[in-house]
Amino acid sequence: MQGNFQNEYHHLRSNLLRVSGWLRHEVNLILDPFDITQQQFNALRVLRGQMKVVRVGAFSTNDLRDLLLDKSADTSRLVDRLVAKGLVSKEPCTIDSRRVNLKLTNEGIQVLTDIDEKMGELDAIFGDLPETEARKLNLWLDRLGGA
């Protein structure tokens, strides 16, 4: 055990925070040219995933909030910013007037495609980690995060 850690769990917590901060910084470097925050990127990815799912009714801001990584996000404000950028559209729900149907615009799809290319470059930094070890690490992190 290196450093002044009380135990291995303290060391693990410190490592996770350090790596998380570094990764957030790297992701921001990719997203900044697109004028997109990480929360907005996550929302766009969720909406893209919903395009592939046949749904009855509308996909609302509440539905989006349930699938976001950051549950504390102000989803209505987040969606309004994406609408203002032309990346998402809001349409009235024909089934329930209290809901709206959120959809990615063509511009939103293109921005995600462009970002995906850049994220592939970021994924390359893990190239020294064998896929079997990455899978194990993902299983451990999923367990730790309650997934």
Image: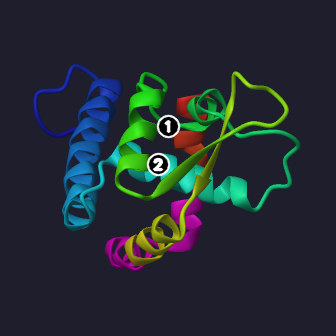
> Quick one: label 2 or label 1, which is nearer the N terminus?
2
Q: Residue at x 80, y 26 (%)?
A: 96
Percent position (x, y) of residue 55? 84, 47
Q: Nearer the viewer, residue 18 or 55?
A: 55
- Asked if residue 133 lies in the magenta stretch, the reply is yes
Give me the disc on residue 42. 2
Residue 19, percent from left and from top: 26, 47
The amino acid pointed to by label 1 is Leu
Region in magenta: 116-137
Residue type of the residue flagged with mark 2 = Asn
- To which quarter of the image does residue 81 belong? top left
Q: Residue at x 33, y 34 (%)?
A: 12
The quadrant of the image that shows the N terminus is top left
Side (left or right) of 94 relative to 129? right
Relative placement, left or right, of 114 versus 64 is left
Left of 56 or right of it: where is 99?
Answer: left
Main secondary structure type of the part rendered in magenta:
helix
**Tag 1 secondary structure:** loop
Query: Mark 2 against mark 1, which lies toward the viewer?
Result: 2
Say whether marks 2 and 1 touch (CB < 8 Å): yes
Q: Residues within 10 Å of mark 1 (few under 14, many from 20)?
A: few
Residue 2 sits above or below residue 135 on the image? above
Using the rendered image of the protein, determine whether residue 137 is visible from the camera's viewpoint: no
Q: Which mark is residue 69?
A: 1
Residue 39 sits in which quadrant?
top left
Going 58% across and 32% down the picture, which residue do you hit?
61
The foreground one among 55 and 28 is: 55
